[in-house]
């Protein structure tokens, strides 16, 4: 019985050593492969971690380890790009609480009272200021896609950038704008 426990412990130690060896040997190459295909380093590192997690959990024999690792990485990249949906302008303006400023109502309101004119003006000033705070690439993608209505496909053809890069830039722009407009909304509600 003691021999079986010792053999099991030895096999577990050997397996840990093999996993560590694979991770050390392939991490750099896989990360380089993934980085070329995703928009930012955080996503690349997440995908790399997912690849090794799948490797550790795999119970089937792997004949071509290198090919298997790169195929899993490619599949994880594809899965991530399918899950990522672009943020919409409505997401920037949307309010989750009951006491929210509804920007869409403000834009399309038939009332042209001094208050609505003031709020529209304040909104556009805040939006322009927030857009000017963005890096040029993010601002350009946001303005072209949301305000000018140009599709990502057309922007990609014009600029030579990949769709994933453009989606990522717009996402960062939307996150920044959402934060800035939330600040304006909080100021208006707490006034």
Image (cartoon, rainbow, N blue to C red):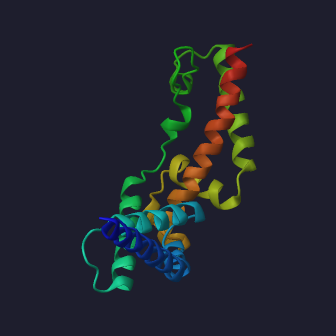
Residue at left offset 64%, top offset 18%: 116
Query: Which residue is at a point 53% across and 71% down the rendered structure image?
Result: 161
Label count reads 0
Where's the N terminus, which quadrant?
A: bottom left
Left-right relation of 60 to 77? left
Rendered residue at 65%/37% (across/down): 179
Percent position of residue 51, x then y: 41, 68
- Residue found at x 52% / y 18%: 110
Image spot of residue 138 (x, y percent) = 63, 56
Residue 9: image quadrant is bottom left
Residue 29 x, y percent position in the rendering? 52, 82
Quadrant in which the C terminus appears: top right
**Residue toward you, 26 or 179:** 26
Say whether residue 167 is left or right of residue 62: right
| Closer to the camera in the image, 38 or 87 | 38
* Horizontal and vertical percent position of residue 76: 38, 65
* Left or right of 146, for residue 54: left
User: Vertical placement of 131 versus 73: above or below?
Assistant: above
Choose between 132 and 98: the one closer to the eye. 98
């Amino acid at each position: 019985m003691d021999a079986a426990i010792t053999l099991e412990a030895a096999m577990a130690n050997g397996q840990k050593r093999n996993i560590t060896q694979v991770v050390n040997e392939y991490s750099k190459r896989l990360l380089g492969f993934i980085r070329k295909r995703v928009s930012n380093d955080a996503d690349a590192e997440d995908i790399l971690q997912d690849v090794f997690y799948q490797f550790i959990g795999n119970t089937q024999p792997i004949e071509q380890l290198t090919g298997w690792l790169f195929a899993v990485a490619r599949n994880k990249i594809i899965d991530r790009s399918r899950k990522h949906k672009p943020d919409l302008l409505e997401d920037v303006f949307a309010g989750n609480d009951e006491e929210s400023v509804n920007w869409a109502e403000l834009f399309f309101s038939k009332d042209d009272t001094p208050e609505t004119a003031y709020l529209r003006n304040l909104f556009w000033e805040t939006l322009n200021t927030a857009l000017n705070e963005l890096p040029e690439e993010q601002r350009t993608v946001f303005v072209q896609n949301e305000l000018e209505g140009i599709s990502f496909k057309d922007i990609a053809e014009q600029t030579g950038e990949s769709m994933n890069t453009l989606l990522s830039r717009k996402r960062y722009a939307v996150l920044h704008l959402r934060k800035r407009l939330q600040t304006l909304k909080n100021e208006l509600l707490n006034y």
